[in-house]
Amino acid sequence: MRHDKLDRELTLMLLMTEPRGYTVPQLCEKLGVSRRNLYYYLDFFRDYGFVVEKRGTVYRLDRQSPFFTKLLRLVHFTEDEAITMRRLLDRLNDNSLQVRHLKNKLEALYDLDILQDVSIREQYAQNVSAIYDAIKYKRCAILRHYSSPHSNTVSDRVVEPFMFMNNNNDIRCYELSSRQNKTFRLSRMESVVLLMDEWTHERKHRQMYTDIFMFSDEQLLPVSLRMGRLSHNLILEEYPKAAAYITKEDDNHWLLSLDVCSYAGIGRFVLGLYDDIEVLGSEAFKDYLRQKIARMQ
């Protein structure tokens, strides 16, 4: 009956959103279904806009899937809000069942396990709060004792922060000394000092994008493909976030339309599966592929 299938789909959805994750045999055992049926359910999720992630042998549903985004829009807390709530709970010095339950919920929904040390978590929350105010009120800030692996230095950076990135782990800023837009990682700064100086270089602020292939740039390049079954399945396995940009054309073809920061990532994918992919656009991407093929020949 359809009711039984819906029950399994909902159960599978809950299992695949748990923090621990499950392998295919474990999911089959918990649902009482065959591997073939399980893969049918996974395809069903993908068709309806869920991002199915495979990390090693473990399958999970990405919480950034469009369905979850819509569902949680009114009740979802940002990570800095979750950290602030955890910070308040830590200050209560209360080990009651209710407080422990709230802490467990926050840790299950957000990646707070990376901040188990209370003092680190406290400083992280203060840094996020200071940067949030700098962005909101368009003021400069000092990133104190920022540790840079590129220059192998630890120094203070005076910046105009204007954008949180990567689930609030990175901050896009305009650095006054270098006159460049740079991305700074929160974990590499000791503290943040909010200044009274207002932004003076807002016109020079440039947003940084990161595509599904993990290439970053300030510009986006449109790409459009028609994929066969093989390339469709492989891109979902290797790059689960691609699901948000795929539409089904017919039983054997899928259309991928997205913006990338570099042709290198998408180009590697296309050239590796050239017989199963038709490049629809853009012309610049087609020229990139022609040049690549010419150099290989």
Image (cartoon, rainbow, N blue to C red):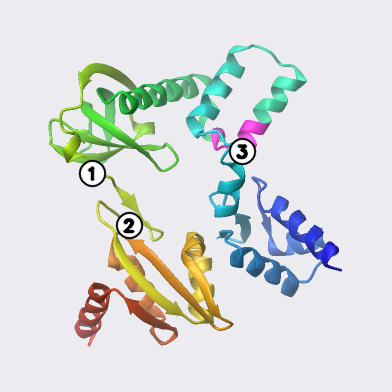
Question: Contact (CB < 8 A) between labels 2 and 1?
Answer: no
Residue 181 lies, in percent from the top left, at 21, 40
Q: Residue 102: which quarter of the image?
A: top right
Cα distance in 3D space between marks 3 and 1 = 31 Å
How many other residues sit within 10 Å of disc 2, few (<14), some (14-19) or many (≥20)?
some
Q: Nearer the viewer, residue 28 or 270?
A: 270
Question: Between disc 3 and disc 2, whose residue precedes?
Answer: 3
* Amino acid type of the residue tagged 1 in the rendering: Arg
Residue at the spot 68% in from the left edge and 70% down from the top edge? 39
SS class of the residue under badge 3?
Answer: helix
Q: Does the magenta stretch include residue 111?
A: yes
Question: Between disc 2 and disc 1, whose residue precedes?
Answer: 1
Residue 263 lies, in percent from the top left, at 29, 67
- Which segment did they paint magenta? 105-112
Q: Residue 130: which quarter of the image?
A: top left
Cα distance in 3D space between marks 2 and 1 = 16 Å
Q: Name the residue under label 1.
A: 206
Foreground label between 2 and 1: 1
Q: Mark 3 points at which residue?
A: 109
Q: Mark 2 points at which residue?
A: 215
Residue at the spot 72% in from the left edge and 68% down from the top edge? 38
* Amino acid type of the residue tagged 3 in the rendering: Leu
Cα distance in 3D space between marks 3 and 2 = 27 Å
Q: Nearer the viewer, residue 162 or 93?
A: 162
* Amino acid type of the residue tagged 2 in the rendering: Phe
Is residue 211 at all visible to an observer of this figure?
A: yes
